[in-house]
Image (tube, rainbow, N blue to C red):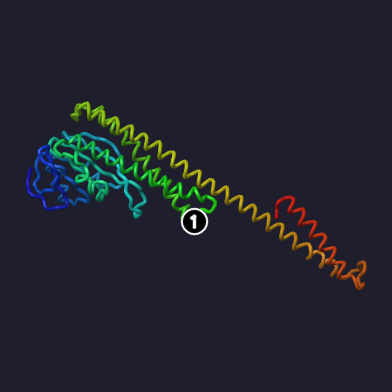
Amino acid sequence: MYGKICWMLNIYYRSVKNKNIRKTKELKPGSWIFAYDVNEDELKFLENLGFDEDYLEDALDFYEVPRVEYEGGVNYFFTRYVIDSNKRSAATAPILIAISDSYILTVSHGKPEFLDNFAHQRQDAITTQRIKFFLLMIDAIVTHYEKSLTKIRRTLSRIMRSVESVSDDDLKEIVKIESRLTDYISALLPTAASLKDMIARRKTLTLHEDDVDILEDLMLDIEQIIDNAKSVYKTAQNIRSTHEVILGHQLNATMKTLTALTILFAVPTIMTGLFGMNVWLPVPEGPLSFLLVVIITAVIVLFTVRFFIKKRWL
């Protein structure tokens, strides 16, 4: 089914004879259909091209998990890519890459940022070579994870340099980073498994030896990212734990100081209360009575201060 398209379905095409990839409204074999936030009419159009309705709807589910499926001669590869927006609770979003005999289709809940300029940035992107084009997309997704992880490392390094004075905003940022890293790991683990499954499905997907090598390299890259994400996650936890230890130590020191000051102020109170009692006491009316009370109080206070300094409470 070929014809003009005037909806949100962006059509790109490039063969080995073309110098650059171009956006077109003419749908023909070898085209890349770039679809996002599709409506019912566009879903119906994609169904008429041979794509399964259920898998298309799954691609629009924001919490869809990575996996690979095969139905009606079409390979459906679900994965998740990094999103930089802070408006959503999740750090990744789903994307479906479907490979049929005629087209390669991408369907996502929103517009993928990494695909926005993908076609024009990759000089080796040829849409008629569907498998290689698919591998380039996966490579772009993996690269986006790597860049995001590098940015997170820099943020944690900045916080680590001043861990003694971590602000509330820094703590909130660390919590967000931990959540983001957890989301990355949860997305990448099944993605790596799906790539491995694709190699095992060579009967339903024509893979050359070079393609298998690239898939294996991508799996290794993903495993390295997962290991790095776990390491960065541990660093974030260590920073938070270190801050809690420092905060607890500072709190203990403050409580010791306040306790010592309370005791010091209590000594004069006890002395004045004692000599203010309406009972007989030594030298009650002597000319040096007040001075004697002050001296006794001062001596007790000095010994108490010395004791607290020795115990490092002051």
Q: Name above or below for residue 233 compared with residue 289.
A: above
Q: Which residue is mark 1?
A: 168
Q: Position of residue 102 (x, y in %)?
A: 12, 37
Q: Residue at x 37, y 35 (%)?
A: 224
Q: Residue at x 13, y 37 (%)?
A: 128
Q: Position of residue 285 (x, y in %)?
A: 92, 73
What residue type is disc 1 on?
Answer: Asp
Q: Name above or below for residue 203 compared with residue 103.
A: above
Tell me the crowding category of disc 1: few under 14, some 14 to 19, or many 20 or more residues within 10 angstroms, Cα based. few
**In the image, 270: left or right of 105?**
right
7 or 285: nearer the eye?
285
Q: Residue at x 40, y 43 (%)?
A: 182
* Secondary-structure class at tag 1: helix
Q: Position of residue 244 (x, y in %)?
A: 55, 49
90 or 56: nearer the eye?
90
Q: How many marks?
A: 1
Q: Quadrant of residue 48?
A: top left
1 or 301: nearer the eye?
301
Q: Residue at x 85, y 63 (%)?
A: 296
Q: Quadrant of residue 66?
A: top left
Q: Name above or below for residue 264 compared with residue 28.
A: below
Where is the C terminus found, in terms of image quarters? bottom right
Q: Position of residue 216 (x, y in %)?
A: 29, 30
